[in-house]
Amino acid sequence: MSDLDQQPEPPVSRAPKASAAARFQRWAGRHRNILIRIGIAIVVVTLLLVFNPSFIGWGAAVTAAIIAVPISRFRSYAGAFLPYGAAWLIFTLLRSLADETGVPLRTTQVTAIERALFDGRIPTIWLQDHLFDPVHMHWYDYATTFIHWSYFFVPHVAAIIMWRKAPDHYRRYLIATVITLGIGLMVYFLSPAAPPWLTADRAPQQDIFRVMANVGRQINSSLYDRTYSALGDPNPVAAMPSLHSAITFLVFLFSLRAGWKVSVPMFTYAILMAFSLVYTGEHYVIDTLVGAAIATYAYVYSGRWLSITAPIFQMVNRRTAPLIPHAPIGTEGFGPSH
């Protein structure tokens, strides 16, 4: 073997690794649009919390839209979600009047049903006896409260995802939402019922803590009181049915066609919502069951109502056709059709 053959091979030159700052800069460049939208959303929420927390519910919907919808599609978004926003606005306004009709509150009747269902016990009282300590907040007190508050954000995000992935599916969800809110309003007017935390003050039973109030004041007493005065005080006795449970269960029902990877988390979320409402003293179990039943009715019959209202949607579609990507007819899920 010659000396030339025995010479070592020259080392392979390698490009120096990019610094963390350079990698972050490249990542930020690829996600520039979404980062801008997240920044705008943070500014919107911050301004609402500082200047007028009473609009935090609407601010959550606007924030979800800013994050989820590209700027180029805001016109089509407005055309699709004006009816959705109008439905929630009308519901909110009428709900504030439902306790001013002079119809007596259903207090002992609801607790009697609850005791009949659970062998003489009130589940909220049993749960708080075993889990809640008003002096020392536990992690699950915060968790159940935040799950409760997520109602003002998660369903709207789900609606936006449905609209982006399957417009036909979103239209059915819109109809089902209107049915659910409408039936809930009718019950509020005809048979107003107090929540557990308020019933305890009116009926001869053990006091029930309002966990949400304890947690909210533990975090920021002034902010909680201002926010609740705007969102809760207009009608504190709109308890039967639970619209929190109804809407979250409705989202679960509409997630069934998207496959188990979506429907299982949404079912878990709906169950956690119902448990949180009962544990925190916001609703009786019967409130959540009636809410789920209303959502099921709305889901089953929304297809029929969709066929009745189809001409309206067709007219809106013609006006925004260049901006709305049309899904295949019959698309039924969050994901693309198969």
Image (spheres, rainbow, N blue to C red):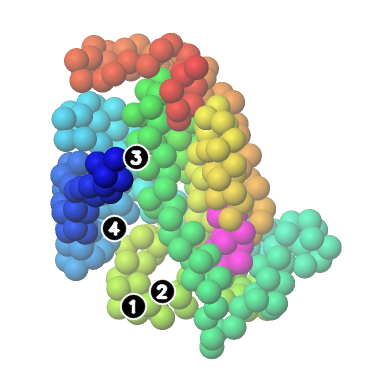
Determine whether the residue tagged by mark 2 lies in a helix, strand or loop: helix
Q: To which residue does mark 2 refer?
A: 216
Q: Residue at x 72, y 67 (%)?
A: 122
Q: Residue at x 25, y 31 (%)?
A: 77
Q: How many marks?
A: 4
Looking at the image, which is closer to me, 180 or 224? 224
Pick whichever of labels 4 and 1 is earlier in the sequence: 4
CB-based contact (under 8 Å), mark 3 and mark 1: no
Determine whether the residue tagged by mark 1 lies in a helix, strand or loop: helix
- What's under tag 4, amino acid-wise? Ile
Which residues lie in the magenta part?
273-282
Q: To which residue does mark 3 refer?
A: 1
In whole angstroms, how far apart are the C-alphas of marks 3 and 2?
Answer: 83 Å
Judge the density around disc 4: few (<14), some (14-19), many (≥20) Cα neighbours within 10 Å.
Answer: many
- What's under tag 3, amino acid-wise? Met
CB-based contact (under 8 Å), mark 1 and mark 2: yes
CB-based contact (under 8 Å), mark 2 and mark 4: no
Looking at the image, which is closer to me, 189 or 24? 24
Q: Is residue 245 above or below residue 72?
A: below
- What's under tag 1, amino acid-wise? Asn
Tell whether position 280 is magenta: yes
Residue 236 on image: x %, y %: 46, 62
Pick whichever of labels 2 and 4 is earlier in the sequence: 4
In the displayed structure image, the side of residue 79 where residue 127 appears, left or right = right
Q: Quadrant of residue 87?
A: top left
Q: Quadrant of residue 6?
A: top left
